[in-house]
Image: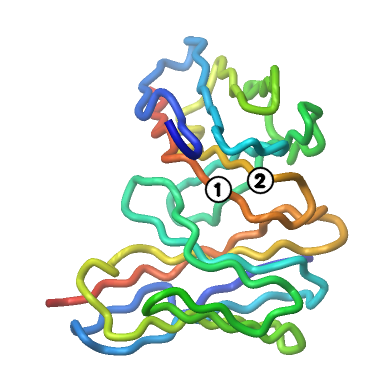
């Protein structure tokens, strides 16, 4: 079964700290992996998309890495700010039965304290 | 309007009501999706349409009925829902199926009383 797992479920850090969110997936045959941000009661905002052939993507203070062989991705947030507080979702587009549809993890709820 | 829009943003309905959720995308995409997000659970894919044809029905109860009249519009018709159907319903679109980046709307918060 194709699954996506995110650890930790929740994380609280002081402002200014660098942090890493983890995502693992069960099948290395993927099209791509997306990281999203979700604010409470709102929709999803796409942060980074890493294609299967790529190792990492960067946008501002965010850097996402992909290691297909080990089934892992990390989202690195540099110099965290209170405005980064949100739930971060990892989603994987797998080959095979799911036809490329996204499989989501449960998310990591991040709280950045001023 | 840009991106993916959804209406209404909030909906409260009784179990005997019939209502519809609407999604519209202004991105020129050909695939559209309905997801359900319940508390403490991952987002669940409900339906997928590619070039107006339904390609995925993820074992969704028949009280949820999707409609895709064209590549820009997607509806979710609701009837005789249960309280456990209360959730955030999210619409998304992508250029096509098969691993393209998905863009999400703001969602409709549905409460069934």
Q: Residue at x 40, y 18 (%)?
A: B13
The chain identifier of the residue carrying mark 1 reads: B
> Measured from the top left, where is residue B6 in percent x and y?
46, 30
Which of the 4 image quadrants contains residue A76? bottom left
Which label was assigned to residue B94? 2
Report the residue that reaches farthest toward the top: B17
Above or below residue B4? Residue A47 is below
> Measured from the top left, where is residue A48 in percent x and y?
53, 68
Which SS class for mark 1?
strand
Which SS class for mark 2?
strand
Q: Residue at x 64, y 36 (%)?
A: B28
Dot 2 or dot 1: first in sequence order is 2
> Which quadrant of the figure contains the N terminus of chain A?
bottom right
Above or below residue A6? Residue B103 is above
Q: Nearer the viewer, residue B82 or A67?
A: A67
Residue of label 1: B103
Above or below residue B79? Residue A69 is below
Which label was assigned to residue B75? none
Left or right: A46 in relation to B58: left
Q: Residue at x 69, y 34 (%)?
A: B60
> Measured from the top left, where is residue A49 in percent x and y?
59, 67
Within-10-Å neighbours for mark 2: few <14, some 14–19, many 20+: many
CA distance separating discs 2 and 1: 6 Å
Left or right: B92 in relation to B108: right
């Amino acid at each position: 079964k194709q699954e996506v797992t995110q650890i930790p479920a929740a994380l609280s850090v002081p402002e200014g700290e660098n942090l890493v969110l983890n995502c693992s997936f069960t099948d290395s045959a993927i099209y791509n992996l997306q990281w999203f941000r979700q604010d409470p009661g709102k929709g999803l905002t796409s942060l980074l998309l890493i294609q299967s052939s790529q190792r990492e993507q960067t946008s501002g203070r965010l850097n996402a890495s992909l290691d297909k062989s080990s089934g892992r991705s990390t989202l690195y947030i540099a110099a965290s700010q209170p405005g980064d507080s949100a739930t971060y979702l990892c989603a994987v587009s797998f080959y095979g039965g799911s036809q490329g549809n996204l499989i989501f993890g449960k998310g990591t709820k991040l709280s950045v304290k001023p | 309007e840009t991106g993916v829009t959804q209406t209404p943003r909030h909906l409260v309905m009784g179990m005997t009501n019939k209502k519809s959720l609407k999604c519209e995308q202004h991105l020129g995409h050909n695939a559209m999706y309905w997801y359900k997000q319940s508390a403490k659970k991952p987002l669940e894919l409900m339906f997928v349409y590619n070039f107006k044809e339904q390609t995925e029905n993820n074992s969704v109860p028949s009280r949820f009925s999707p409609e895709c009249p064209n590549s820009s519009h997607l509806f979710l018709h609701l009837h005789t829902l249960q309280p456990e159907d209360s959730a955030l319903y999210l619409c998304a679109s992508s250029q096509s199926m098969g691993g393209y980046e998905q863009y999400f709307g703001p969602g409709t918060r549905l409460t069934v009383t």
